Image (cartoon, coloured by chain):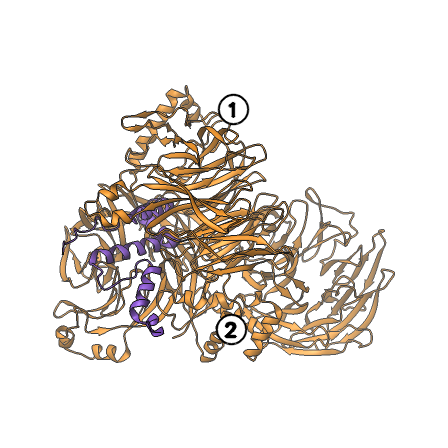
Chain colours: A orange, B purple
């Protein structure tokens, strides 16, 4: 079995981010490392974050820093990754990609403890760079420029110190003196040797300054001082003329200013009033804002509170450090302050956000200062505050992020054309169920009622140079309605369009004249108001029209074609005639090429299943240039011109090319390349779009021509980052459409559907899925689909949080306290704040998170959700510190009166530290009441450990309780044990069943295949795996095969060899399995791992499903970082050969950007086996053209054929 | 000393031990081995963001806190070392 792996939805969780001006000049961009890809983001003028570029790097990015050489206008980006290399990138605006400027190898690959890559710091003047590992190694590179102003990098200088753990490093701003780097270090050599443990207790963190002597080219430890033992992060303080230099040391509960020869200045971080006493407050992310006259820091704590830190200083003496409460938003992994007054917050989990500054924290809020620091016998006196709604920031945009995906199911619950993907995402109060549909999201701007059922709509400009459309023309079966587009859209009668007849086409001709084609003639409206009317001869009517800016071709009933051409005077003149053998089904003229008077190609589709290309050259006399037969009569034709381009905002190099698209009556879209010289057709591709014949329309997407295809659902064909993508829109069936451009909406689409006129824009181009989210209460763990009622049963649980009642009580307490303090503010709240004064928004848990409780407290609930109405029909909050971990539906064989029951496995008082302990486990059995909308507890059965896996098996319930697999039957008061097997190594986390086989997944020891012998009532393990796998997800593939994923980010397939499988099945007495013993406590037979692939992300769910109607199954997987991927099995040997060769060439010619070897990455834990990396293959179109040709030659194909192959295989998945 | 001595197994091992912290040797005890394994594991968790996120979800802590906890644990991953025998 060979698989093709493809990422369907890129990971959205952000590891780290950096801000700089990578394009150069004044603009600022944000680079984020999300999952394994590097993305360049920029907020546009309207405050929406747009992705300029995104590239998969096939490696783990661990740190990013921007730097700039003095005097330069552009920032470089240094990347620390798991490649054992330092990579410096430069963004190229012309080609829209990152270029590798330098790649310096210094060690082994992988995230190792002494191989640098974890930390990066740069001298603020861009003269040197330090890259450090968790332990021991630190390397300093000197950055400079050569005579032609190119960046140069020196060989590394070592600043190693053995037995030392590094917590954080940063570059100290010391103007143009020698570059200095600061590091928090901890020496463990004593602790390792002292058996009494005293040395460990006394281990002291140090703040060390490393100085790079540029003259001697040498790094020395300049200064090392003990600092607070809770120190975890360093933030550089502006120096030179702008500030006092030095660093802020963020420590648990404190922020301390330190510099050489300067006393420490310390202030406490204010605490939330409801925070348990034993918990510290840790800073997890920081951003610095610098202006000419001032600077401040925004530091965020692990609870989401952001503090503004300012320093009172005179010269380089700091007199006071102030920490002021700023605002609260979800915990971030990185924050960036933009000069344009935005704050980008990359959330650790869930959606990212862009905030706009409304103030910079000058209001009165809780402030802690070094001046008022009080030291008592118990330590420093804490300062308390109460979080409030956003006051200094305003949310203006969100970037959807599915991180983390906890569980996923592909099912066509809504009975749509394609299945939906239900994912459980997020954590704590920001958890959601997201329903994903393949397709682009649209934004509906207006829907208006029309007087009747419309058949067509067009928009026209009055002049070719106009920016916006002037008229919108709607055709009905017997009339035409003309609307003018301005501030509003209203009906007009002075347009000179004929309104008593239906229209066949409306278009702008030449520079400034309008044309209306109706069944009886052509009406040409000149700019000065003159109207020329051409009438059809005799009783014939016009049936089809094709036109471009200067040419019009009409087809009369009977099959006669008449060709009109616009002359120099702007007159429309009949130029030629042609008789077709039969009626014409559709017509299209190619757009006029730049600098030409006319286009040469006319495409005519006939009912005899052919498409002909006719020449419109005056010398050729409409001769047929080529004929293409198709599978079904064409319904609609469209020429799509791809202009020659070399990169730009989105895309790689493209030669100019012309595509002919045809929508066939059988619902297939047929695409072929038209040779620009001869008119020959080649390279045909077809794709089934839907049940109706696609109608094709040209529209604009990001300034380029794109194609809208209206079948039973609308599709958009457009070019995105060098790929032609054909993606469905998540919208209803449309009849006819046209592009729409007005003041309010630059690139919209107007469409008619029955008697409605709809205006919409297309959002978030380039994304595969369109999401809709339903909020949940706690971190969702798992869910099951209840097929009968089409509901979802979800279990949610959170550690270390208060139950709903306790939270309500706490909130009341808070409100009361606040009410007393702020003199009747509570009254205003109840009235909805009508008093007009600036009032804080109500506290939402989404923004603030749940208050922290003791770590062994759990909250949990079971929810029945109706995804159609998005309504929760039942929510059971578990009591007594119980938390739900597993769920399944079960039908007990002899208890038909109950029907389907819901089994939920819970644990009480589960604690992980210092040792995993649990008070008790339970299996709850619930009965569905109220037509499946509600639950009623039947009984609960105590067990000795947490049941982490439940599954129905032959009308009974199988439960994995710790290391015991047990079979239960339903009793009146309890579940009744029927049979058990205690021979599993650790903890059972997954159970799948098929016929009489049971596939058990162990948390640490991969799969165990078991058999249940009914007559003896015994469970046997007959096969297991040889590899220790820390299973995080499992799915049953076939009788002998299981797919699994381990927590190190690998996906694998385990298969029982065929002969072993047969032997086991042919053993009638079962005596063999029963008495056969494996070696070293293992099972007698071993499964083979037939597929190995390193995803580079923890896979949390796997499912075999098909995302397209009538498509083959693929394995769909979701990951913790929020990505969705698919593994498709190849069906032919040729494809395997082709793609493995393409992959091989790609590896050689286009090694990953961050320096990790592709093959080594995909084999990070186990050598990759029988999986071809589609993500790498799909980078083919981004290669330079000559490289594409070179690879294509090696594969004995043309680049076009390779692109077609890539497109085809993608279309098989989605 | 012959040139080939430079490549014999012992000098190669010594070189590795000096260069790569945590390389084992013949007299390595159980404790030393465990300490190295644990430190390597923590460093690997810290370096791999998805893993940190996975653990952070289980413990309902922030990723930043988890990273800090793992770094703290690198000091004494297996408790104090056992008493050394005199001989």
Q: Percent from the top left, x then y, of residue A1018?
A: 14, 67
Residue A701: image quadrant is bottom right
The total number of labels drawn is: 2
Q: Percent from the top left, x then y, of residue A566?
A: 82, 64
Q: Is residue A137 left or right of residue A883?
A: right
Q: Is residue A398 left or right of residue A844?
A: right
Q: Please give the residue where the numbered disc 1 appears in the rendered image.
A: A836
Residue B47: image quadrant is bottom left
Return the chain for callout 2.
Answer: A
User: Quick one: A1118 or A1211, which is closer to the camera?
Assistant: A1118
Return the chain for callout 1.
Answer: A
User: Quick one: A475 or A1126, which is closer to the camera?
Assistant: A1126
Neighbourhood count class around disc 2 (C-alpha, 10 Å): few under 14, some 14–19, many 20 upward: some
User: Quick one: A216 or A638, which is closer to the camera?
Assistant: A216
Q: Percent from the top left, x then y, of residue A1163?
A: 39, 67
Q: Is residue A464 left or right of residue A128?
A: right
Q: Residue A1145 shows which numbered tag?
A: 2
Q: Residue A695 shows which numbered tag?
A: none
Q: Is residue A1137 above or below residue A541?
A: below
Q: Percent from the top left, x then y, of residue A600?
A: 76, 71
Q: SS of the residue at dot 2? A: helix
Name which residue lies at 58% across and 72% down: A685
Quarter occupied by the N terminus of chain A: bottom left
Neighbourhood count class around disc 1 (C-alpha, 10 Å): few under 14, some 14–19, many 20 upward: few
Q: Is residue A1101 left or right of residue A950?
A: right
Asked whether residue A933 appears in the rendered view, the answer is no
State the CA–CA distance, disc 1 to disc 2.
Answer: 67 Å
Asked whether residue A533 appears in the rendered view, the answer is yes
* Mark 1 vs 2, N-terminal side: 1
User: Quick one: A1026 or A147, which is closer to the camera?
Assistant: A147
Q: SS of the residue at dot 1? A: loop
Q: Marks 1 and 2: same chain? A: yes
């Amino acid at each position: 079995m060979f698989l093709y792996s493809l990422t369907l939805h890129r990971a959205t969780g952000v590891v780290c981010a950096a801000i700089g001006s990578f394009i150069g000049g004044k603009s600022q961009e944000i680079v984020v490392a999300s999952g394994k890809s590097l993305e360049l983001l920029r907020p546009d003028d309207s405050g929406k974050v747009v992705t300029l570029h995104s590239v998969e790097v096939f490696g783990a990015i661990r740190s990013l820093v921007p730097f700039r050489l003095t005097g330069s206008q552009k920032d470089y980006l240094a990347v620390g990754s798991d490649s054992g290399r330092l990579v410096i990138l430069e963004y190229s605006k012309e080609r829209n990609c990152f270029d590798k400027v330098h790649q310096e190898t210094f060690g082994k690959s992988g995230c190792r403890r002494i191989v640098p890559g974890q930390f990066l710091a740069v001298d603020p003047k861009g003269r040197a760079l330090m890259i450090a590992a968790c332990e021991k190694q630190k390397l300093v590179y000197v950055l400079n420029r050569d005579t032609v102003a190119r960046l140069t990098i020196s060989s590394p200088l070592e600043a190693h110190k053995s037995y030392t753990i590094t917590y954080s490093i940063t570059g100290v701003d010391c103007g143009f003196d020698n570059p200095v780097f600061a590091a928090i270090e901890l020496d463990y050599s004593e602790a390792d040797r002292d058996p009494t443990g005293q040395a460990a207790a006394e281990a002291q963190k140090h703040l060390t300054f490393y100085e790079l002597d540029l003259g001697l080219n040498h790094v020395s430890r300049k200064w090392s001082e003990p600092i607070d033992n809770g120190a975890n992060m360093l933030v550089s303080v502006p120096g030179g003329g702008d500030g006092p230099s030095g660093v802020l040391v963020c420590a648990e509960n404190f922020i301390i200013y330190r510099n050489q020869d300067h006393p420490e200045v310390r202030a406490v971080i204010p605490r939330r009033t409801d925070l348990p006493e034993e918990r510290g407050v840790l800073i997890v992310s920081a951003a610095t804002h610098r202006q000419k006259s001032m600077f401040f820091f925004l530091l965020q704590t692990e609870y989401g509170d952001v503090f503004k830190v300012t320093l009172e200083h005179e010269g380089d003496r700091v007199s006071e450090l102030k920490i002021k409460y700023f605002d609260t938003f979800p915990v971030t992994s990185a924050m960036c302050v933009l000069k344009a007054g935005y704050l980008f917050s990359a959330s650790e989990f869930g959606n990212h956000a862009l905030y706009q500054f409304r103030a910079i924290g000058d209001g009165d809020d809780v402030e802690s200062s070094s001046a008022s620091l009080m030291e008592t016998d118990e330590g420093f006196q804490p300062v308390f505050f109460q979080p409030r709604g956003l006051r200094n920031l305003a949310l203006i945009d969100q970037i959807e992020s599915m991180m983390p995906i906890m569980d996923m199911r592909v099912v066509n619950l809504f009975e749509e054309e394609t299945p939906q993907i239900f994912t459980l995402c997020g954590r704590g109060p920001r958890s959601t169920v997201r329903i994903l549909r393949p397709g682009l999201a649209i934004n509906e701007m207006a829907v208006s009622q029309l007087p009747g059922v419309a058949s067509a709509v067009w928009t026209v400009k009055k002049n070719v140079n106009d920016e916006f459309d002037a008229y919108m023309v709607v055709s009905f079966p017997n009339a035409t309605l003309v609307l003018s587009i301005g501030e509003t859209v209203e009906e007009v009668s002075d347009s000179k369009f004929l309104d008593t007849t239906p229209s066949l086409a409306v278009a702008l001709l030449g520079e400034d004249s309008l044309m209306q084609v109706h069944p009886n003639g052509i009406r040409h409206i000149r700019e000065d108001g003159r109207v020329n009317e051409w009438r059809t001869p005799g009783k014939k009517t016009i049936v089809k029209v094709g036109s471009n800016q200067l040419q019009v071709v009409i087809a009369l009933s009977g099959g006669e074609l008449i060709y009109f051409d616009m002359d120099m005077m702007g007159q429309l003149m009949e130029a030629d005639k042609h008789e077709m053998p039969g009626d014409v089904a559709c017509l299209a003229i190619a757009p006029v090429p730049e600098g030409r008077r006319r286009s040469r190609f006319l495409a005519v589709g006939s009912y005899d299943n052919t498409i002909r290309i006719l020449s419109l050259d005056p010398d050729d006399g409409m001769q047929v240039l080529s004929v293409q037969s198709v599978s079904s009569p064409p319904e609609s034709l469209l020429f799509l011109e791809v202009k020659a381009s070399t990169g730009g905002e989105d895309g790689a190099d493209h030669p100019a090319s012309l595509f002919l698209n045809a929508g066939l009556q059988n619902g297939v879209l047929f695409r072929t390349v038209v040779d620009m010289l001869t008119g020959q057709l080649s390279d045909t591709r077809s794709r089934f779009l839907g049940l109706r014949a696609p109608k094709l329309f040209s529209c604009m997407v990001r300034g380029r021509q794109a194609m809208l295809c209206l079948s039973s659902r609308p599709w958009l064909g457009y070019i995105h980052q060098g790929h032609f993508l054909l993606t469905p829109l998540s919208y209803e069936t449309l009849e006819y459409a046209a592009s729409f451009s007005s003041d309010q909406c630059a690139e919209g689409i107007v469409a008619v559907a029955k008697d409605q006129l709809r205006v919409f824009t297309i959002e978030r181009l380039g994304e595969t899925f369109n999401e809709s989210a339903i909020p949940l209460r706690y971190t969702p763990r798992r869910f099951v689909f209840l097929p009968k009622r089409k509901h979802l049963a979800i279990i949610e649980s959170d550690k270390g949080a208060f139950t709903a009642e306790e939270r309500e009580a706490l909130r009341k307490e808070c409100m009361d306290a606040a009410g007393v303090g702020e003199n009747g503010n509570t009254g205003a709240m109840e009235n909805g704040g009508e008093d007009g004064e600036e009032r804080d928004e109500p506290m939402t848990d989404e923004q603030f998170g749940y208050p922290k409780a003791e770590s062994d407290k759990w909250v949990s609930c079971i929810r029945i959700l109706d995804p159609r109405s998005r309504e929760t029909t039942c929510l059971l909050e578990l009591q007594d510190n119980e938390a739900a971990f597993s769920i399944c539906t079960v039908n007990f064989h002899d208890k038909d009166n109950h029907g389907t029951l819901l089994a939920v496995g819970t644990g009480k008082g589960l604690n992980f530290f210092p040792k995993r302990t649990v008070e008790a486990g339970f299996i709850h059995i619930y009965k569905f009441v109220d037509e499946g909308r509600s639950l009623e507890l039947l009984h609960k059965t105590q067990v000795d450990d947490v049941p982490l896996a439940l599954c129905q098996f032959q009308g009974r319930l199988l439960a994995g309780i710790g290391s015991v697999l047990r079979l239960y039957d339903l009793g009146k008061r309890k579940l009744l044990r029927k049979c058990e097997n205690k021979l599993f190594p650790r903890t059972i986390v997954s159970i799948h069943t098929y016929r009489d086989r049971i596939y058990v997944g162990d948390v640490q020891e991969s799969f165990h295949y078991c058999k249940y012998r009914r007559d003896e009532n015994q469970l046997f393990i007959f096969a297991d795996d040889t590899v220790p796998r820390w299973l995080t997800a499992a799915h049953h593939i076939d009788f002998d095969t299981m797919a699994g994923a381990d927590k190190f980010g690998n996906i694998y397939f385990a298969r029982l060899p065929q002969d072993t499988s047969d032997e086991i099945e042919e053993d009638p007495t079962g005596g063999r399995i029963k008495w056969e013993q494996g070696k070293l406590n293992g099972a007698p037979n071993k499964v083979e791992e037939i597929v190995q692939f390193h995803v580079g992300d923890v896979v949390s769910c796997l499912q075999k499903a098909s995302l397209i109607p009538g498509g083959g199954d693929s394995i769909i997987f979701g990951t913790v970082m929020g990505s969705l991927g698919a593994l498709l099995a190849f069906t032919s040997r040729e494809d395997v050969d082709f793609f493995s060769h393409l992959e091989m060439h790609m590896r050689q010619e286009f090694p990953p950007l961050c320096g990790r070897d592709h093959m080594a990455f995909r084999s990070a834990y186990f050598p990759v086996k029988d999986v071809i990396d589609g993500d790498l293959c799909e980078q083919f179109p981004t290669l330079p053209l000559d490289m594409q040709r070179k690879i294509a030659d090696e594969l004995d194909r043309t680049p076009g054929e390779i692109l077609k192959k890539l497109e085809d295989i993608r279309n098989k998945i989605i | 000393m012959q040139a080939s001595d430079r490549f014999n197994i012992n000098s190669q091992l010594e070189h590795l031990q000096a260069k790569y912290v945590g390389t084992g040797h013949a007299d390595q005890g159980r404790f030393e081995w465990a300490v190295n394994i644990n430190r390597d594991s923590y460093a690997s968790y810290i370096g791999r963001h998805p893993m940190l996120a996975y653990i952070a979800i289980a413990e309902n802590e922030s990723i930043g806190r988890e990273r800090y906890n793992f770094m703290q644990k690198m000091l004494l991953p297996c408790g104090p070392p056992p008493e050394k025998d005199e001989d």
